[in-house]
Image: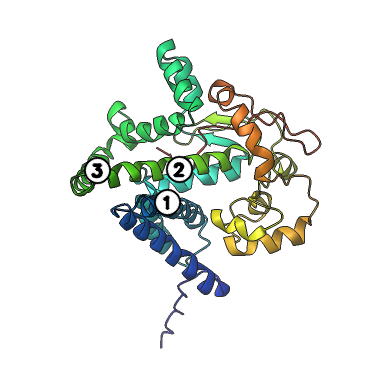
Amino acid sequence: MAIAAKKKPLFRYADGLLPNSLAMAYTLTAWFGGLALLFASSPWLNALGTLLLAHGMIMAAYFIHEFAHGSIFSKPRHNEWAGNVCSWMSGSCYARFADLRHKHMRHHVDRADVITFDSKAFLKARPVWFQKLVLMLEWAYVPAVELIMHFYVILMPFITDHEKHRVRRGQVAAVFGLRAFLFALLGWFSLKALLLYGVAWMIMLTVLRFADAYQHTYDAFAVLGEGKVPDDKLRDRRYEQQNTFTNVVSLRWPALNLLLLNFSYHNVHHEKPAEPWYRLPALHAKLYGSAYAQVIPMRALLPSFHKHRLRRVLDDDYGVVVQGQPDHFYGAVGVSFLTAV
């Protein structure tokens, strides 16, 4: 008599039921609740709605990261399904979840910033007026480079004859058509709500790019498909930890790191990539303690983010951290895990 296979639990880890349920419920509430408040007549409620919607998008984006690592659900298809839902919520739905996951896994395996679009090479090849336009927008804190990368994901299937990308033309066109219809419908009901939705999305891009900018001093390589990272140096675990930084939201109030789903605990994440988000603070304390040299609070990084916001657009040098001081840590740009082809 055949023995029935044991049914897998919904969540990968037994202790994940409560934290994951609460975090996902908050993400959905913030997203839909924030969107609803965009239609209110009160400017204060509009402002609250914009911030709530932006944070719902941010949480959805970081959940994509968790789903990519398979740290939430026990079945891969559940992580993929939830990842696709969060991709729609965060506006990264033109890229397939499988491609987002593959790109991010290469970041861990190759110990490099593996990018699918070299924004710096692209800009350097453009006319001077275009470069100046991008720099002007970046000066005004408009995340122009990230916008270009998102547009590239949409255009890629239509500007190449590569079979892998060409077969996605119908899917990308359908997603674009549906989103255009939904945005037109939103604007028909309320132009104000449509504009505030755009503001919320830009806030999400800015928050994610600030976090991404200061988590590594890796080398960046534009790699399409299965292209390899050059074997020009030893990229071992020691290299990985020395070039990874834990840019915590706050040392004094660690709970604030939940605003980014504990993504800031980046060294411990690279040490144990499949460890779920809610375990990272305790694991960081166990492995590194409170005086780990790779920890840099975001407050200390804000001056660099402001000062070098134009330099990082075209400069390949991420800068260095000298004796824990981030004054010459210029940061990365265009390394978002939300853009992949």
Label 2: how many Cα within 10 Å (few below 14, some 14–19, many 20+): many
Residue 17 visible to the viewer:
yes
Looking at the rendered structure, the secondary structure element under dot 2 is: helix
Please identify the quarter of the rendering in which residue 305 is found: top right
Please identify the quarter of the rendering in which residue 37 is found: bottom left
Q: Quadrant of the N terminus?
A: bottom left
Give the residue displayed 30% in from the left and 55% down from the top.
40
Q: Earlier in the sequence, mark 2 or mark 1?
A: 1
Q: Earlier in the sequence, mark 2 or mark 3?
A: 3
Give the residue displayed 22% in from the left and 42% down from the top.
180
Looking at the rendered image, the disc whose residue lies closer to the viewer, 2 or 1, is 2
| Distance in Å between CA atoms under marks 2 and 3 | 19 Å
Q: Nearer the viewer, residue 184 or 294?
A: 184
Label 1 belongs to which residue? 57
Please identify the quarter of the rendering in which residue 210 is found: top right
Label 2 belongs to which residue? 203
Asked whether, in this view, residue 160 is left or right of residue 284, the answer is: left
